[in-house]
Amino acid sequence: MTLRINDDAPNFTADTTQGPIEFHKWIGDGWAILFSHPKDFTPVCTTELGYMAKLAPEFAKRNTKVIGLSVDPVASHAKWEKDIEETQGAKVNYPMIGDPELKVAKLYDMLPADAGTSCDGRTAANNATVRTVFVVGPDRKIKLMLSYPMSTGRNFDEVLRVLDSIQLTAKHKVATPVNWKQGEDVIIVPAVSDDEAKQKFPNGWKTMKPYLRVVPQPR
């Protein structure tokens, strides 16, 4: 199963460090970020989980839940969380999915079907592809996928920035330009005619090219 943006996010049930969940029900009426890790007690991922714990309040402001996944059992996650808090100065405040049978990793196309059915004996190198960030919308569709190599820590500030863009463009017929940040100018999408744009943006816009119309960010 190959996943793409705007596909339905596969639903699943799983045990987590905060109890069993059904993913779609757990999301509720908001957004969700599912981010995966090749193995517990790995150095780069330890820094990532700690930083995500620090960012959790920012995601909460955006009606977004955070959930992690590692191809290890929940009991292992619980032990790892202690190391994360000790070394990163942040307590993991979101659930971590236990996936010892590799079911979720396969469901989300992060491991091949022939990867086996157990985390036993597997190393971080075996699971190198279990290292993706998924943003899922209230409609249960995938809005973003980001995959990183094991040796490169992910930029979760960028995930927050992209979430701001996705939520903004879901409400307004605009797109965000390169390196856009909250509060900066945006682009009127080409599908909006000038006549429609006058209704939506009565204060006007700057036309750089017929297809490139820049306007202050809608509030």
Image (cartoon, rainbow, N blue to C red):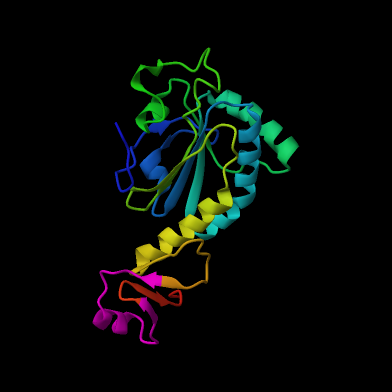
Q: Quadrant of the N terminus?
A: top left
Identified at 47% across, 73% down, the residue is: 185
Q: Quadrant of residue 41?
A: top right
Identified at 53% across, 28% down, the residue is: 38
Residue sticking out furthest to the bottom: 203
Identified at 41% across, 25% down, the residue is: 111
Identified at 69% across, 32% down, the residue is: 82
Q: Is residue 195 magenta?
A: yes
Apparent side of residue 140 relative to residue 49 in the rendered image (left or right):
left
Tell me residue 200's x, y (percent): 32, 80
Q: In the depicted view, which residue is nearer to us: 10 or 108?
A: 108
Tell me residue 99's x, y (percent): 47, 26
Q: Which residues are magenta?
A: 187-208
- Is residue 57 placed above or below 151 in the rendered structure? below
Apparent side of residue 83 relative to residue 172 in the rendered image (left or right):
right
Q: Is residue 18 magenta?
A: no
Tell me residue 141's x, y (percent): 33, 48
- Is residue 176 placed above or below 115 in the rendered structure? below
Q: In the depicted view, which residue is nearer to us: 76 or 214?
A: 214
Residue sticking out furthest to the front: 209
Apparent side of residue 193 relative to residue 131 in the rendered image (left or right):
left
Q: Quadrant of the C terminus?
A: bottom left
- Is residue 2 placed above or below 127 in the rendered structure? below
Tell me residue 158's x, y (percent): 54, 53
